[in-house]
Image (cartoon, rainbow, N blue to C red):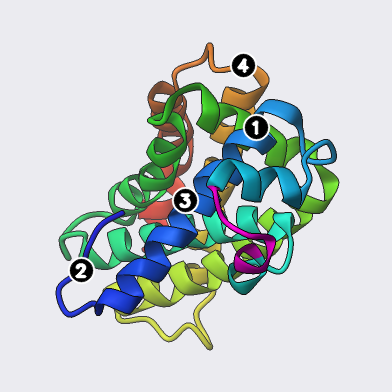
Amino acid sequence: MTTRPGVSLAQRKRQLVSDVLTEAALNLLARKGFDAVTVDEIVAAAGVSKRTFFRYFASKEDVVVHFLTEMGAGMRAELAGRPAPEPPSVALRHTVWVSIDACAGHGDRALRVVQLILGTPALLARFLERQAQWRDELAAEVARRLALDPATDLYPQLAAGIALTAFDTVLQRWSASDGAEDPAALADQAFAVIAPALDAAA
């Protein structure tokens, strides 16, 4: 958990409890599978009550959705912070890498969580739903960077969609290889393919 300036003690406590619940849930889900884990097991592992769980999450599915929300926020922040002169392909490559690295950089458990999301229809549906939101947010940032009107110019939505397709492809390949393939190398390959289209149209 990172503590931000100006965050109250109550907010920090809420974040701590949320982090503990998320960690316990993802560990169990990754190890046992989505259908095999109960909320009772999650709260026992986290050392909190079921009532506390439901103050933070409506269901065990919502724990995974929270994880995905944080991934999207990380990408949006990364793109907003990239240097203005960077070509779109470079800025979007770094943007997508933030989330790939968040998955690949946390060892076997992260791989199992990705495999869980991709292999569980209910979670995959929520993942794709979140990606639609990410695409709109990234498109708005691309439009801002390039001084384009997202209401009339197709480029921002297309660029964000292409970058997220690369993100999906890397996660799918990494997951299917059971972690054997290097996600950094996969990301480099993916953006080598799409960079000419991203940069030629900008």
For label 1, the residue is 30
Label 2, residues with CA under 10 Å away: few <14, some 14-19, many ≥20: few
Q: Of the numbered discs in the image, which one, if any, rests on residue 20?
A: 3
Q: Of the numbered discs in the image, which one, if any, rests on residue 178?
A: 4
On screen, residue 11 versus residue 125, left or right, reads left
Residue 48 in which image quadrant: bottom right
The disc, 4 or 1, on the residue closer to the chain's N-terminal end is 1
The disc, 3 or 4, on the residue closer to the chain's N-terminal end is 3
**Nearest-to-viewer mark from 2 and 3:** 3
**Mark 3 to mark 4: distance in Å?**
26 Å
The disc, 1 or 2, on the residue closer to the chain's N-terminal end is 2
**Mark 2 to mark 4: distance in Å?**
35 Å
* Residue 146 in sight: no
**Mark 2 to mark 3: distance in Å?**
18 Å
For label 2, the residue is 4
| Element on which disc 2 rests | loop
* Mark 3 vs 4: CB contact within 8 A: no
Instruction: Kindly identify the residue that appears in the image at 44 percent across and 18 percent down.
Output: 182
User: Which stretch is magenta?
Assistant: 47-53
Figure disc tally:
4
On screen, residue 97 versus residue 132, left or right, reads left
| Element on which disc 4 rests | loop
| Element on which disc 3 rests | helix
Asked whether residue 46 is drawn in magenta, I would say no
Instruction: Kindly identify the residue that appears in the image at 74 percent across and 29 percent down.
Output: 32
Label 1, residues with CA under 10 Å away: few <14, some 14-19, many ≥20: many
Q: Label 4 amino acid? A: Asp
**Nearest-to-viewer mark from 3 and 4:** 3
